[in-house]
Image (tube, rainbow, N blue to C red):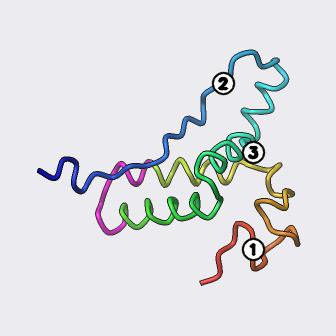
Amino acid sequence: GQGNAGAIYYTKLDLKAIPQGLSPENITKLAMDKSSVLAAVVKKLGSYELLLGELQYAFLLFLVGQSYESFEQWKTLLLLLSSCEEALGDEQFMGSAGAASDEGLFIDF
């Protein structure tokens, strides 16, 4: 048999998880800015391009395949990316210019 042929596997994301031992100040910071969560997800995946690829893949499967699971993943990834104010100034994510360039979060089509 083919086992789970056609199954979709996404990166598990829990934006509400709070690591043990954080001070109240750091818990508030984490609730307001998910940059540390983004960094952990990128580290887990290996590159930010893979994160953006998963965002695009989830959107396409939601749009074309009408997959609710894909919609939820796309929504969660979009929420994560839109709540990372600190990462906006980070060259690792935004490229060396700190704005839209040939490298960083923006992919030229």
Residue 24 image-quadrant placement: top right
Query: Which residue: 61% across, 64% down?
Result: 49
In the depicted view, which residue is nearer to us: 13 or 49? 49
Q: Nearer the viewer, mark 1 or mark 2?
A: 1
Residue 95 image-quadrant placement: bottom right
Residue at the limit of the structure toward the front, as seen here? 1
- Give x and y (percent) for residue 69: 36, 48
Looking at the figure, which quarter contains the C terminus? bottom right
Query: Which residue: 85% across, 23% down?
Result: 25
Q: What is the three-letter code of the residue carrying label 3?
A: Ser
Sequence-wise first label, 1 or 3: 3
Residue under pointer 1: 103
Q: Is residue 6 above or below residue 109?
A: above
Residue at the limit of the structure toward the top, as seen here? 21
Packing grade of label 2 (10 A; few <14, some 14-19, many >=20) is: few
Query: Marks 1/2: CA distance?
Result: 31 Å
Instruction: Identify the secondary structure beneath mark 3.
Output: helix
Residue under pointer 3: 35
In the depicted view, which residue is nearer to us: 46 or 53? 46
Instruction: Identify the secondary structure beneath mark 2.
Output: loop
Q: Is residue 83 above or below residue 20?
A: below
Instruction: Identify the secondary structure beneath mark 1.
Output: loop
Read off the magenta span.
63-72
Residue under pointer 2: 18
Q: What is the three-letter code of the residue carrying label 1?
A: Glu
Query: Marks 3/2: CA distance?
Result: 14 Å
